[in-house]
Image (spheres, helix red, strand yellow):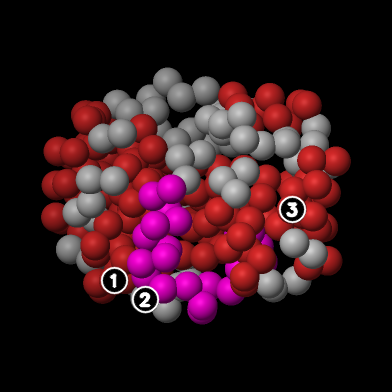
Amino acid sequence: MTANDILTQLKALGDEKVFAQNKKRGASENQFGVKMGDIRTLAKKIKINHELGLELWDTENADARFLSILILDPKKLSNEQIAKMVSSEKFVHIADWFYSYIIKDYSDRETLRQAWMHSTDVMHGRAAWSLTSGCVARNPDVLDLPSLLDRIENEMPTAAPEVQWTMNSTLAQIGIKFPEYRTRALAIGEKLGIYRDYPTSKGCTSPFAPIWINEMVRRQE
């Protein structure tokens, strides 16, 4: 199958409600609105096909990019390719898929994280703080937690919304995982007030850091 063949299939699977939902969440018009289940089913049929994945990514079509992420081979991507791909995608749903399936377990992710922590590119910043949040949970020895808290306190109020989200995740993870920094993490969250009034569905935990931290700590007790 060629990229054009895949686009034809994706177009046939398009759903108006999904299209509208994606548009509301920040996707461009370059999409068909394919359900995630249909994208996963198609990916299972194709299996890993790195070259086709790259071709699909280059179409800039949202559904093609979701599919691309599932059929790419991360081991065949260079740091430069990953950096270019991250900066080229502004729809955070795709960006977060790319983080989860490509970047999260990439062999040289720490090099990328360190470079992107000082980047002015918004999507690099979002990915950098996602990686940092992951490090807090799984590999905190590479981090200077007090310095991270300083950066969050000073930079998060004026950060782009895309970056605020993952900075906030880092703040919450520090407060949850490290009792010695919990008081300060809670104080920063209260001081900044970011996501204090965020609408939260019944049964879900608020992203407001103090609520998030306290709830997760309570569950661990």
Q: Give the percent coordinates (x, y) of residue 208.
A: 40, 33
Up/down of 155 relative to 126, above or below = above
| Residue segment shown in magenta | 68-88
Residue matched to label 2: 108
Q: Give the percent coordinates (x, y) of residue 138.
A: 40, 69
- For the point 73% across and 32% down, which residue is it? 18
Q: Closer to the camera, 129 or 55?
A: 55
Taking the image as drawn, is residue 201 in sight?
no
Residue matched to label 1: 111
Q: Give the percent coordinates (x, y) of residue 210.
A: 35, 37
Q: CA distance from mark 2 to mark 1?
A: 6 Å
- The amino acid sitting under disc 3 is Asn
Viewer-side label of 2, 3: 3
- For the point 83% across and 49% down, which residue is it? 9
Mark 1 residue element? helix
Residue matched to label 3: 4
Q: Closer to the camera, 104 or 90?
A: 90
The majority secondary structure of the magenta stretch comes to helix
- The amino acid sitting under disc 1 is Thr
Work out whether mark 3 precedes mark 1 in sequence or the reverse, and give the earlier one.
3
Q: Closer to the camera, 78 or 205?
A: 78
Q: Quadrant of the N terminus?
A: bottom right
Q: CA distance from mark 2 to mark 3?
A: 32 Å
- Indicate the quadrant where residue 27 lies: top right
Q: Give the percent coordinates (x, y) of residue 15.
A: 80, 32
Confirm whether the magenta stretch covers residue 70: yes
**Pointer 2 and pointer 3: residues touching (CB < 8 Å)?**
no
- Indicate the quadrant where residue 192 lies: top left
Mark 2 residue element? loop
Q: Tell me the crowding category of disc 1: few under 14, some 14 to 19, or many 20 or more residues within 10 angstroms, Cα based.
A: few
Left or right, 56 with reference to 32: left
Up/down of 112 relative to 164, above or below = below
